[in-house]
Image: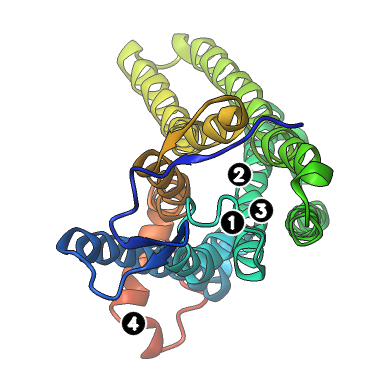
């Protein structure tokens, strides 16, 4: 029999009460519960608004109609749906509450969570591939990364992500007795799922960004004879900072959650606050992505200003040069 998994029931979520060994949303929430929900609602609003700005910018301004930005558009769409669907689902049906019950709502919640989060991660991986060809093979970039290739990447990402979410849901709905299905569920939830959704994309991203950094460093050294040492040093620091932020935020948000999921079947108990915190930390990556992949670029910042100020509604600015 597979090792038994459970959350420490002595540490109950502040918004739930125990009723027949089930967590039920309390009718008289505490101040802590209210503050938690206000904070999570704020995260959801920021996630939705940030990614919505990215989508409008890329769709409206023709200058942003590039293969790279279409990948960012796909990422923003996935993260937008995380803010609209996954965040509310997680607020009403907490991760610890849905860790073991096999009800329809919990499985649907898990399906959206897995599909959209996986799509977001896989798109981040595709963006790293795009950056690899842009930096390491600039002469062949336009032939290697074109609209057809990017469209294929996006379709494969969404298809694989939806398939993984559906498979996990079907497995959960068909599991009536633990003796017959627990081993399969543990294998999928703690091994196969994390490998496909996180570990494999993370390893690919690590290798690609390491290669990008090394190539950028070599290119900077080659032009050292034609530029001042200070300018070269500044360029190296900027490249290092950008790669560190992109990869560091991604790993910071997702690694703790997936490590916990992987080792969950082999440990005695996990405190509820720990599970909830790691779950929301992972989801917060969808809120941070617009800042990382859009706010770092001056043309996006200008596009955001024109959208927020309502300037695009007072004239035809879709052909505007964003500098």
Q: Are marks 3 and 4 in contact (CB under 8 Å)?
A: no
Q: Position of residue 232 (x, y in %)?
A: 39, 17
User: Label 2 neighbourhood size at 10 Å, few (<14), some (14-19), many (20+)?
Assistant: many
Residue 143 visible in the displayed image: no
Q: Position of residue 283 (x, y in %)?
A: 47, 51
Q: Secondary structure at mark 1?
A: helix
Q: Are marks 2 and 3 in contact (CB under 8 Å)?
A: no
Q: Which callout, 1 or 4, points to the residue nearer the camera?
A: 1
- The CA distance from mark 2 to mark 3 is 9 Å
- The CA distance from mark 1 to mark 4 is 25 Å
Q: Residue at x 76, y 35 (%)?
A: 187
Mark 3 and mark 4 lie on one chain; the one further toward the N terminus is 3
Mark 1 and mark 3 lie on one chain; the one further toward the N terminus is 1
Mark 1 and mark 4 lie on one chain; the one further toward the N terminus is 1
Q: Is residue 86 left or right of residue 13?
A: right
Disc marking residue 75: 1
Q: Secondary structure at mark 4?
A: helix
Q: Are marks 2 and 1 in contact (CB under 8 Å)?
A: yes
Q: Secondary structure at mark 2?
A: helix
**Residue 315 occupies quadrant:** bottom left
- The CA distance from mark 2 to mark 4 is 31 Å
Disc marking residue 311: 4
- The CA distance from mark 1 to mark 3 is 8 Å
Q: Secondary structure at mark 3?
A: helix
Mark 2 and mark 4 lie on one chain; the one further toward the N terminus is 2
Query: Which residue in the structure is indicated by mark 2?
Result: 124
Disc marking residue 119: 3
The C terminus lies in which quarter of the figure?
bottom left
User: Label 3 neighbourhood size at 10 Å, few (<14), some (14-19), many (20+)?
Assistant: many
Q: Are marks 1 and 3 in contact (CB under 8 Å)?
A: no
Q: Which callout, 3 or 4, points to the residue nearer the camera?
A: 3
Q: Residue at x 45, y 14 (%)?
A: 226
């Amino acid at each position: 029999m597979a090792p038994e998994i459970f959350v420490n029931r002595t540490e109950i979520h502040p918004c739930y009460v125990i009723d027949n060994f089930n967590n039920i949303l309390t009718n008289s929430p505490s101040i802590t519960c209210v503050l938690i929900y206000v904070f999570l609602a704020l995260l959801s609003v920021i996630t939705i608004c940030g990614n919505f700005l990215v989508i409008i910018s890329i769709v409206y301004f023709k200058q942003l109609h590039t293969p790279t930005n279409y990948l960012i558009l796909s990422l923003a769409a996935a993260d937008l749906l995380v803010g609209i669907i996954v965040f509310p689902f997680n607020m009403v049906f907490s991760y610890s509450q849905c860790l073991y019950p096999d009800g329809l709502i919990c499985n649907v919640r898990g399906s959206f969570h897995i599909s959209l989060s996986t799509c977001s991660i896989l798109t981040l991986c595709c963006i790293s591939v795009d950056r690899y060809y842009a930096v390491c093979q600039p002469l062949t970039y336009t032939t290697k990364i074109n609209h057809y290739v990017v469209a294929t990447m996006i379709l494969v990402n969404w298809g694989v992500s939806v398939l993984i979410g559906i498979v996990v849901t079907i497995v959960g709905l068909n599991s009536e007795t633990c003796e017959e299905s627990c081993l399969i569920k543990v294998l999928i939830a703690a091994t196969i799922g994390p490998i496909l959704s996180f570990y494999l994309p993370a390893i690919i991203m690590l290798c690609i960004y390491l290669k990008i950094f090394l190539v950028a460093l070599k290119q900077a050294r080659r032009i050292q004879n034609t530029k001042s040492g200070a300018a070269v040093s500044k360029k190296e620091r900027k490249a290092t900072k950008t790669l560190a932020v992109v990869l560091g935020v991604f790993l910071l948000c997702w690694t703790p959650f997936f490590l916990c999921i992987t080792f969950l079947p082999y440990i005695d108990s996990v405190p509820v606050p720990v599970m909830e915190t790691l779950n929301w930390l992972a989801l917060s990556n969808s809120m941070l992505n617009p800042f990382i992949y859009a706010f770092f670029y001056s043309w996006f910042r200008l596009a955001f200003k024109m959208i927020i100020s309502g300037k695009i509604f007072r004239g035809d600015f879709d052909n505007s040069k964003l500098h």
